[in-house]
Structure formats: C-alpha cells, structure tokens
Amino acid sequence: MDYLEFKIKCLEQFREILIAELSMIGFNSFLETEEGIDAYTLESDFDRTAFDEVMDQYKVDAEITLEEGIMPKVNWNEEWEKNYDPIAVDDLVYVRASFHPSKPEFKHEIVINPKMSFGTGHHATTFQMLRNQGQIDHQGKRVLDVGSGTGILAVMAHLLGASEVEAFDIDDWCVDNGNENFDLNGLTTRMELGTIREVNPKGEFDIVLANINKNVLLDEMNIYGDLLKNDGFLLLSGFYTQDIEDLNECATPLGLELIAQQSKDNWAALILQKKA
C-alpha cells in the first residue's frame, strides 16, 4: 500500500501546528526538514477536502508552498538517520535510534528505528504518554497498547516490568516496524494488524494505552472500559486540551474516573482509573 507524500515548505513557527492539524485528519508520519515538513498518509486514509481546508487556513500566515507525490514502500532508515534526533523524557527514558550512542544515566532506554511509523516520542502526545506511564506501576501487570505505531509505548511497558504486553495497529507498515522495534528492545510479543474490534483482545487488562485521535477514542471508549480490571488504568492522548471535557463526559458513565491530566503544546494526556 503506497503513501501519499506532501512536501510542505512553511515558516518554522508553524511546523508543530501543521503536524498537529494534519495528524487530526489521518496523517501518521512526519519528517521535519530545513524548509518545513514532509507529511505522509496512506492513500486509503487521505481526505482531500480536509487537507485543502488545513492548507487554505494557514497558507498565507505560514507562507506555505506544497509539492505532492507518491512514496512507494521503501526502507526509510537512511532518511531517518539524517533527520532523527534522540529525545529525553525527564530522567525516565532516553529514546534513540540504533545509530545513536547509549546514555546509561537514564532509568530506561528505548531504541526506535521509526521508518514511516508514527510515535517516536517527539510528538507531544507520545512524550506525555511515556511520562504518564512512568507514574503507573507496571510491575507484573497485563498491558494493552491500542494503535501502537512504532511500538514505543509497548516497549516502555515492558521496560517498566509488565508481565504481558499486547499491541496492534491498523497499518501494516506500523506492524512491520513495530515488530522490528520489539526485537531491538527484547520483546518477544508480536504486534497484530487490525482495529480493536478486529483483533478482539481478551480482557482483563491492568493498563490500557491509547494514543489515537479524539473520534476513535470516543468510539472505542466503552471497549477500553470493558477490557480493564477494576482499579485498572486507562492512559489517553491524541487530542487537544479543549477536547478533555468531551473525553471525560464519555468516560465517566463507564466508571472511568479522571485522576490526572496534563498538556504540552496544546495536546492533552489523561490518566483515568476504572472504579467498581
């Protein structure tokens, strides 16, 4: 399955804004360049009307110029090696590619070769999910990673002591890449392909991780609740701070109580707990 490629030249201060806007309409891979961003989406997921609306909204202020093309399925390690920088989430975890040196001063280290998959820790949602995972006891727990992307959150769960980790994604690129990243970090589990309804994971789980977009979270919230044990934790991100109320209104009737929230670059992350 081919990806559509959009080379967007823009003012530097609009890079994060455009990444945020495009991720909300189905784009799941981004590469920052000297002149702006390269954005990628599966042909089957592309919404021309929504894309044009985003471009029109920022075209003048961001001084956008655009080139469109098709990117066949190729190995992107060389491109990521040119552009991918390691990140640190507090002193909790250092996320690096295999070509970067290790930093043993961090509590944990994750090696990610992201290729075309979304979720490297650079985006505010992934960063906050990792940070929130550090607040939850994973030792001996059963963990489900919904929409796993590069597999970074599943890897984090493993490093934090989870006894069992299940992960899946709707994108076959992510599944291939995620399984490679699992191998790099010592996970023997395999990422599955499909939606949560297609994969049909069997509960109960102590922790459910879901870093997806708002509409998917709202649609699947009852499934997350059903899969959680009483007193289990649901960690959510992938939506704006102004969407917190909508997510909470959906979760509360399901017995999911909001116990913590944070935001970064206007992206929100929540920790909810299932109450009996």
Image (tube, rainbow, N blue to C red):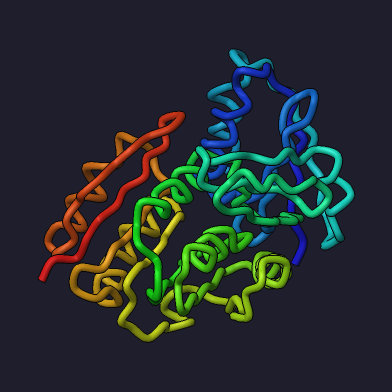
Residue at 33% in and 76% down: 205
**Left or right: 45 in relation to 173:** left
Residue at 86% in and 39% down: 82
**Left or right: 21 in relation to 109:** left
x, y percent for residue 99: 83, 50
Which of the two residues, 89 or 107, is positioned nearer the viewer here? 107
Relative to 242, is 35 above or below? above
Residue at 52% in and 36% down: 21
Q: Residue furthest right?
A: 78
Relative to 230, is 85 above or below? above
**Left or right: 80 in relation to 152:** right
Which of the two residues, 113 or 164, is positioned nearer the viewer here? 164
x, y percent for residue 69: 82, 45
x, y percent for residue 162: 45, 72
Residue at 75% in and 30% down: 66
Residue 53 figure quarter: top right
Count every numbered label the image shows and give the total. 0
Which of the two residues, 202 or 91, is positioned nearer the viewer here? 91
x, y percent for residue 33: 78, 30
For the C terminus, the image quarter is: bottom left
Relative to 261, is 115 above or below? below
For the N terminus, the image quarter is: bottom right
